[in-house]
Image (tube, rainbow, N blue to C red):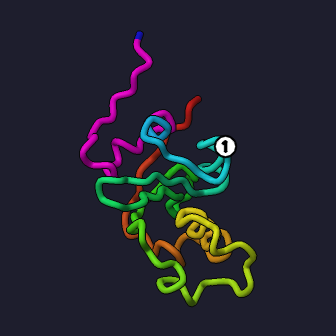
Amino acid sequence: MSNTITIPHPGHPEHIENLASIRLLEAQGFEGTDASLEESLFEYGLIWRHIPETKEFLFVYPHHAIDGRTFDRCTFDEDTDVEKEFDYLLPLGEPDWDELTLPEKIAALIYWHGHENVFGASYWEGFPIADNQ
């Protein structure tokens, strides 16, 4: 039995079949605020990966669903000016803000203001992600 993971739609990083399990997400280089991708997604509510071909970051986060295992995704250009785009959400006097990467700034904004205030409202049913168990 091979341990090789095949990405279902390698030319379409946002395709929900590419995002269907923690193993697929790990194979594509997703990361989060915790060393464990599962903890980052299921407990802290955010993971991301850089997509060099499109010069974007792809974020995956919980959908507002009852089951807690339904998710949505959103992209931001890698050169997004967080201070300009989210000036109404930025905290005053946050230490070390300028040293944070784009994903770390987005994670901080979500922590302070919630997913919907950063990514906007989600108007579809979302998609499931299986854990590694």
Majority secondary structure of the magenta segment? loop
- Residue at 63% in and 77% down: 113
Q: What percent of the width, then of the height, locates residue 71?
A: 47, 55
Q: The C terminus lies in which quarter of the figure?
A: top right
Secondary structure under the numbered disc 1 in the rendered image: loop
Q: What percent of the width, then of the height, locates residue 36?
A: 65, 41
As rendered, which of 48 and 98 lies closer to the eye?
Answer: 98
Q: Tell how many labels.
A: 1
Instruction: Examine the structure image and report whether residue 13 is included in the region drawn in magenta.
Output: yes
Q: Which residue lies furthest to the front in this view?
A: 99
Q: What percent of the width, then of the height, locates residue 106?
A: 56, 68
As rendered, which of 17 and 9 lies closer to the eye?
Answer: 9
- Residue at 46% in and 38% down: 21
Q: The N terminus lies in which quarter of the figure?
A: top left
Q: Residue furthest bottom?
A: 88
- Residue at 30% in and 59% down: 54
Vertical placement of 56 versus 98: above or below?
above
The picture quadrant where one finds residue 9 is top left
Vertical placement of 92 versus 13: above or below?
below
Q: Magenta span covers which residues? A: 2-23
- Residue at 47% in and 42% down: 29
> Hey, what amino acid is under mark 1?
Ala
Q: Name the residue under label 1.
A: 35
Instruction: Examine the structure image and report whether residue 66 is included in the region drawn in magenta.
Output: no
Vertical placement of 51 versus 107: above or below?
above
Q: What percent of the width, then of the height, locates residue 115?
A: 55, 70
Judge left or right: residue 59 versus residue 110.
left
Judge left or right: residue 13 versus residue 102.
left
